[in-house]
Amino acid sequence: MTDNDFSVYALRVKNLVLSIYTPGIKLCGGRTIFKRNGRLFQFMNVLFDISTLGIAHSLEFLKTGIFRVVENLAIGLYEADNCNITFCASHYNYKNCRDFFDSHPVFSEYAFSQPDKGLSSFFNYMEPLRLQISKSNQNNWKTPFRRIYHWGKKFAEPINEKDIQTANIFHSPFLPIPRQIIQNKRIKKFITIHDLTALIHPEYYPSSTVEFMKIILGSIKPDTFVTCVSESTRQDFLAYMPSFAPARASVVYLAAGGNFYCCQDQELIAQTGRKYRIPVGSPYFMALSTLNPNKNFERIINSFIRMVKENPLKDLHLVLVGASGWNSERIFKEAENSGEIAKRIILTGYVADEDLAPLYSGALAFLFPSLYEGFGLPPLEAMKCGTPVITSNNSSLPEVVGDAAITINPRDEDALCQAMLDVYKSEPLRKKLSALSLERAKMFNWEKTTRESITAYKQALST
């Protein structure tokens, strides 16, 4: 028996033990109903796609918002009493996902859907080769290799058929629903929609991102259930797919992880700041995101430059946290062209998770004047750290920050400058916003997100 077979067996035993020691158990249409402390529980067999975790595990700089969402929801479902979860992934990402779990102490035992071993070996061999060829100048190899690779993907089935037969829920938290799941009429299909910004504002994204979003939506059929991360995103989704039944689209809000907290250790804040070239004792505004056009970094930089030029703020810095994104050269150029002020604009690049709370906590305020969002995890992370937030009054962001932040029109540079100046000058305002932030952040937690996801599963199973 392999380690994976044993893990699957162990989780099946969990179901059996419940049937032995819990009175009133019965099986109904593949669902297990059991009674505990006088209450009925529904024990669900869930297939959960964690391909995103494997991708980010192999490419560290991709450990951004969606990675954290998938990771925390996977942990929540894994630990839920009434959820028997089996993880699955695409063929070409299977090994990376296994590596992720093996390095993650939370998942001491887990069931992972083992695809066809021959095809898995094929993709384990082809994936590193694909990356090498894509980076090389050997163009004569690229086209035939791409054809072979995509031929394999076309015919490969990423999930073991036995696991599909025993599952009654499939959930993709980001990627398109696989063909073999779409074709199965029995299993309840879920997909999470994070945002439709690439379709609403295609000018902010490369064409490949726009097309990929269309593929995701193309995998949604009339029998799919959709969880949206905000009411704003739900409305965008229903507007884009007007024939989809609104009752099948629900809202499940996200949360910030446990690694975001109000850090009061001044030495740790200073030490972390030094690591990213932030002068000790200097106040700073912070912005965080992948450096994409919709995040409005150019306007942040322009507003900072203007504020420093118009006011005697010799000690103030601007810290921009995030990996390079599409068309981010313009952002770097904007910073470089700011003359002497350029020395006060710090581009950190990718920052490790353990350093984020000290960086957030040390900031005067967190700036997030995004032009459009599906949810807005960074402002929530900042609020959980007790950091005052200045953000946009559009899309989903008012749902996240409520009255706990300063909200502005993200295209109004005057408003952004004034908000930054107000926060810089007023300690009472900073303390007020900090207290409001901490209180607001309590409304969002991963236990609640997991619980609402399971509620959506139960409602689907009752239809």
Image (cartoon, rainbow, N blue to C red):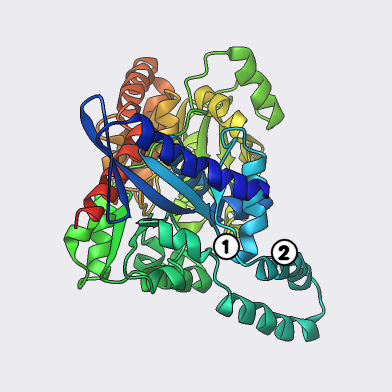
Q: Nearer the viewer, mark 1 or mark 2?
A: 2
Q: Residue at x 30, y 58 (%)?
A: 226
Mark 2: few/some/many CA within 10 Å (<14, 14-19, 20+): some
Q: Name the kind of residue labelled 1 in the image.
A: Asn
The image shows residue 108 at horizontal and vertical percentages of: 60, 35
Q: For marks 1 and 2, give the CA distance.
A: 32 Å
Q: Quadrant of residue 266?
A: top right
The answer to which of marks 1 and 2 sits earlier in the sequence is 2
Q: Residue furthest front?
A: 20
Q: Can residue 210 be seen?
A: no
Q: Residue at x 64, y 26 (%)?
A: 273
Which quarter of the image is occupied by the C terminus? bottom left
The image shows residue 41 at horizontal and vertical percentages of: 27, 37
Location of mark 1 (residue)? 327
Side (left or right) of 298 relative to 194: right
Q: Secondary structure at mark 1?
A: loop
- Which numbered disc covers residue 66? none
Q: Name the kind of residue labelled 2 in the image.
A: Asn
In-front residue for pair 355/90: 90
Q: Secondary structure at mark 2?
A: helix
Q: Is 396 placed above or below 353 here?
A: below
Mark 1: few/some/many CA within 10 Å (<14, 14-19, 20+): some
